[in-house]
């Protein structure tokens, strides 16, 4: 793509995380938001692809981290906690762990996502509990996010199915700044 004079900044303020599954727990959402939602009937026909619910581990309290990563198909992209960052642009950033509170974790961190081509940039927000693998994630096209408060329902990393009652509350705001990285 051509070099842009301005860069879109999507400020994603992660407010809180709710009902993260514990280690070994599985809570696939097998019904739609309203019982009988016809768009969710595929779980009845291909149940082995949706997973089966498993109970939580009583000793499996998690200390979640939030990771945000940008995948740019074209043009400049970077993420930072400081809107006026002077360091080398990075494509990912992470929060500190919220100690043993995966049920109702208060995060309160803002990520500033810079993208010359926001409609060709994918943002992936992952949650892990200090283990090697992520527990939950959600991905979206950066330019398609709507401003305001949003509840992102998270997905299971193994099967990609929605996790029942597992949400990340975020506030999204957009602005534009001069492209300092044009060269």
Image (tube, rainbow, N blue to C red):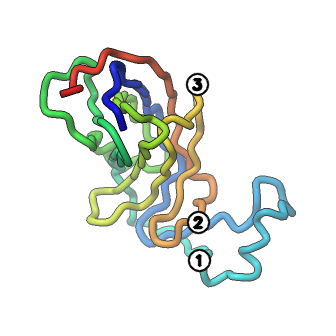
What's the distance in space between the residues labelled 2 and 3, CA to CA? 25 Å
Badge 2 or badge 1: first in the primary sequence: 1
- Mark 2 touches mark 3? (CB < 8 Å): no
Q: Say if residue 67 shows up in the picture.
A: yes
Quadrant placement of the N terminus: top left
123 or 156, nearer to the observer: 123
What's the distance in space between the residues labelled 2 and 1, CA to CA? 8 Å
Give how far across and how far down residue 122 sits, in percent: 43, 46
State the mark number for residue 102. none
Identify the image quadrant of residue 151: top right
- Mark 3 touches mark 1? (CB < 8 Å): no
Toward the left, the furthest residue is: 87
- For the point 51% across and 46% down, which residue is it? 140
- For the point 62% across and 84% down, which residue is it? 48
Q: Could you tell me which secondary element the residue under label 1 belongs to?
A: loop
116 or 67, nearer to the observer: 116
**Disc 3 designates what residue?**
148
**Disc 2 designates what residue?**
161
- For the point 56% across and 75% down, which residue is it? 54
The answer to whether residue 6 is above or below residue 128 is above
Badge 3 or badge 1: first in the primary sequence: 1
Give how far across and how far down residue 79 sits, in percent: 29, 34
Give how far across and how far down residue 144 sits, in percent: 56, 37
């Amino acid at each position: 793509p051509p070099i842009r004079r301005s860069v879109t900044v999507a400020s994603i303020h992660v407010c809180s995380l709710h009902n993260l599954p514990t280690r070994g727990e599985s809570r696939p959402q097998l019904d739609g938001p309203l019982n009988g939602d016809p768009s969710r009937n595929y779980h009845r026909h291909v149940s082995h692809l949706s997973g089966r619910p498993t109970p939580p581990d009583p000793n499996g309290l998690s200390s979640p981290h939030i990771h945000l990563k940008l995948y740019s198909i074209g043009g400049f992209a970077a993420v930072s906690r400081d809107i006026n960052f002077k360091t080398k642009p990075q494509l990912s950033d992470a929060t500190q762990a919220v100690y043993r509170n995966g049920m109702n974790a208060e995060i309160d961190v803002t990520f500033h996502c810079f993208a010359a081509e926001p409609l060709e940039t994918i943002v992936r927000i992952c949650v892990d509990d200090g283990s090697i693998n992520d527990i939950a994630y959600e991905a979206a096209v950066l330019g398609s996010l709507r401003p305001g408060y949003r509840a992102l329902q998270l997905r299971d990393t193994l099967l990609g199915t929605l996790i029942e009652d597992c949400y990340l509350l975020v506030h999204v705001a957009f602005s534009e700044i001069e492209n300092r990285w044009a060269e």
